[in-house]
Amino acid sequence: MKVEPLLYGDRKVYTVSAFNRGVGSWLARLPTVWVEGEVTELRRQAGWQSVFFTLKDLEDGTCLPVSMPRRGFDGLRLELADGDRVHVYGRAELYGARGVFQLRALSIEPLGLGDVLAGLERLKRKLAAEGLFAPARKRPLPGFPRRIGLLTGHEAAAKRDFLTAVAARFPAASVVVAETYVQGPLAAEGIAATLQRLCAQPGVDVLVLARGGGSFEDLLPFSDERVVRAVASCPVPVVSAVGHEQDTPLCDLAADARASTPTAAARLVVPDERELRERLQSLKAALARAPLLLVERKRAGLEGIAGRLRALSPKATLRRGYAIVRTDNGIVRSAPTLERDKRVDVELAEGAFGARVEEISE
Amino acid sequence: MNAEPTFEEARKELERIVAQLESGRADLEQAEALWERGEELYRICLAKLDSAQGKIEELPREG
């Protein structure tokens, strides 16, 4: 942007606004980069279009104001707090109205997240190579579970949602609930062990892992190798209902079925009792109709055969105008075997008569 | 039949029997046995549905 100065004789003079615009457009040409620092003075309010914080150098405390559009910030689903160490991806910008230089953030990653992601990717490839995620390993869920094993967090909404949905669809379902830590350092171990305990409960023929949404870090235990292996080696089918639709913890890939919410998981594991009863009634009705239907069918089949048989009988031929001529020697097939005045019997479609031979031609 | 079937097994067999009877392919002699088996399966399914008792239990914490 070209900024025009005012001229006082030989002196070029810029207005504050023009100066800031000039510096701003010059800053805007700088590349987008990653900057590392610690979050302080995080400020966000419901009505604001942007989220603000100050990024502090980890060594000498140098400060840099940062702003990020609120929509982008919320989309990251970071539970960012003062003191967090982060990588911010953004570029230099001048906030013209106040003449403040700042970093305009496009993305923020907790420090070390890159390593975590790379580790997850390595684990995913390793487990995939072992065949843990193979479609051929997926088992069908029981259509009518005897006992459902549910693993959830303590006091979890996920548990309530699942049990409510189960009760609505199939009040007679049996569920055994095991609570454990579903986030934090104890979670992976706790989930893996609790899965095994649930599997060992008598009668349990399907397992559900239910956990509501959370930050990327919160859901990490569900991608832990111990948990993924426990899911894969579970002797009964496992339904994974972890996080939101867009989250794909590795346990989802190892599970036999995946549900977007605990309520959706309930729909997968229990049948709708009303539908089931209706289906049974219609089967019962079909069964009641079946014997009569079968006899009718057999009768129709029999009549078809009888019709074909009748068409082949001599009677049918006679009805078309033919006659059978007999002598004492049986049916006459050739005129020269007859003699004049010989008595013959002629059979027609309807009735018969006796006659004498008058003429014989060869 | 040896052991009592599960609900799913009973229901699948019932569906199969009804389909077989409706197709008209069964012999009359065979049909009677099929029909009786169907009725039995229907009673098994219904009994299992009716007798299922919803129960929510909490598994105690380890240790």
Image: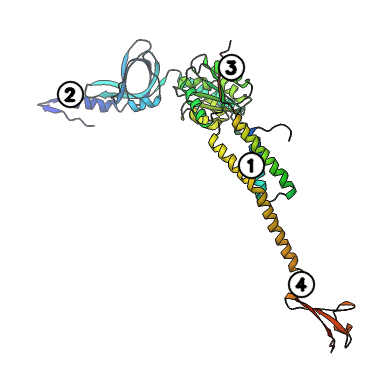
Question: How far is mark 2 from mark 4, CA to CA?
Answer: 121 Å
Quadrant in which residue A338 is drawn: bottom right
Instruction: Answer with mark 3 or mark 4, whichever residue precedes in sequence.
Output: 3
Q: Which mark is residue A16?
A: 2
Q: Which mark is residue B15?
A: 1
Q: From where the camera sits, is residue A353 visible? A: yes
Of badges 1 and 4, the one in the foreground is 4
> Does mark 4 fall on the same chain as mark 3?
yes
Locate the C terminus of chain A and report the quarter of the image it occupies: bottom right
Where disc 2 sits, the SS reads: helix
> Which residue occupies the foreground of this view, A287 or A271?
A287
> Which residue occupies the foreground of this view, A62 or A208?
A208
Instruction: Answer with mark 3 or mark 2, whichever residue precedes in sequence.
Output: 2
Q: Which mark is residue A193?
A: 3
Where disc 4 sits, the SS reads: helix
Quadrant in which residue A85 is drawn: top left
Is label 3 in contact with label 4 (beta carbons under 8 Å)? no
